[in-house]
Image (cartoon, rainbow, N blue to C red):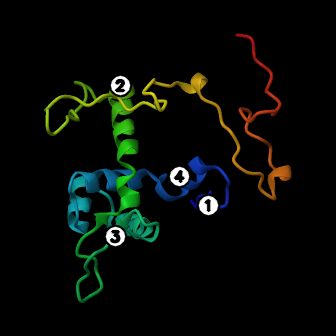
């Protein structure tokens, strides 16, 4: 089954999912954060088919999330390392882990804790915050367009865009 590419969409979430939205991709990134570097290690830790792993690793390298600092004479990568772009996914991985621990834990509870290396204390939940540190929820923020794109007249504005028509409220 071919998936639709989101790379031409103006939405940052859609464009991000185009690169990192496949199931195995974020698990590969998770493993890279935990120190996995070699193809065989990724395969063993994830149980992913070699062809799928090859495709996902290639896509992450092409997308600038992973880099291959060294290769063998046969052209096979000796190791994969996170780039700055890849390391910027750390809050995403932690937020998914925390969400899963809260809403989809395995029987018996979460399998691990994320702790501050220096203090040994659990880290706080990942939450959007204002510049002053106040925790923000969906009702505390709004989307503000930065520029009008040439194709904007063809697109429907996001419902939270100032001046956009609001969808009717459904009574419950």
For residue 102, the mark is: 2
Quarter of the view holding residue 45: bottom left
The answer for how far apart the CA atoms under marks 1 and 3 are is: 21 Å
For residue 147, the mark is: none
For marks 3 and 4 on the same chain, the one whose residue lies earlier in the sequence: 4
Name the residue furthest top.
Answer: 172
Residue 101 can be seen, yes or no? yes
Residue at screen point 49% across, 52% down: 21
For marks 1 and 3 on the same chain, the one whose residue lies earlier in the sequence: 1
Contact between labelled residues 3 and 1, with CB atoms less than 8 Å apart: no
For residue 17, the mark is: 4
Please tell me how crowded label 3 is: few (under 14), some (14-19), or many (20+) other residues with Cα within 10 Å. many
The answer for how far apart the CA atoms under marks 2 and 1 are is: 31 Å
Note whether 157 is above or below 6 in the view shown. Answer: above
Quarter of the view holding residue 60: bottom left
Q: Which quarter shows the C terminus?
A: top right
For marks 4 and 1 on the same chain, the one whose residue lies earlier in the sequence: 1
Looking at the picture, how far across and down is residue 6, in whole percent?
Answer: 62, 57
**In this figure, which residue is indicated by the disc labeled 1?**
7
């Amino acid at each position: 089954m071919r998936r639709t590419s989101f790379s031409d969409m103006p939405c940052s979430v859609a464009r991000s999912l185009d690169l990192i939205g496949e199931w195995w991709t974020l698990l590969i990134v998770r493993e890279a954060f935990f120190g996995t570097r070699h193809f065989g290690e990724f395969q063993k830790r994830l149980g992913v088919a070699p062809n799928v792993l090859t495709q996902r690793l290639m896509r992450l390298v092409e997308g600038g999330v992973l880099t291959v600092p060294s290769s063998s004479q046969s052209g096979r990568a000796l190791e994969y390392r996170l780039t700055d772009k890849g390391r910027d996914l750390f809050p995403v991985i932690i937020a998914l882990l925390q969400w899963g621990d809260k809403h989809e834990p395995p029987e018996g509870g979460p399998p691990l804790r994320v702790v501050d290396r220096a203090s040994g204390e659990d880290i706080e939940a990942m939450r959007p915050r204002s510049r002053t540190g106040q925790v923000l929820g969906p009702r505390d923020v709004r989307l503000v367009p930065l520029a009008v794109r040439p194709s904007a007249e063809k697109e429907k504005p996001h419902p939270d865009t100032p001046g956009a028509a609001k969808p009717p409220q459904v009574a419950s």
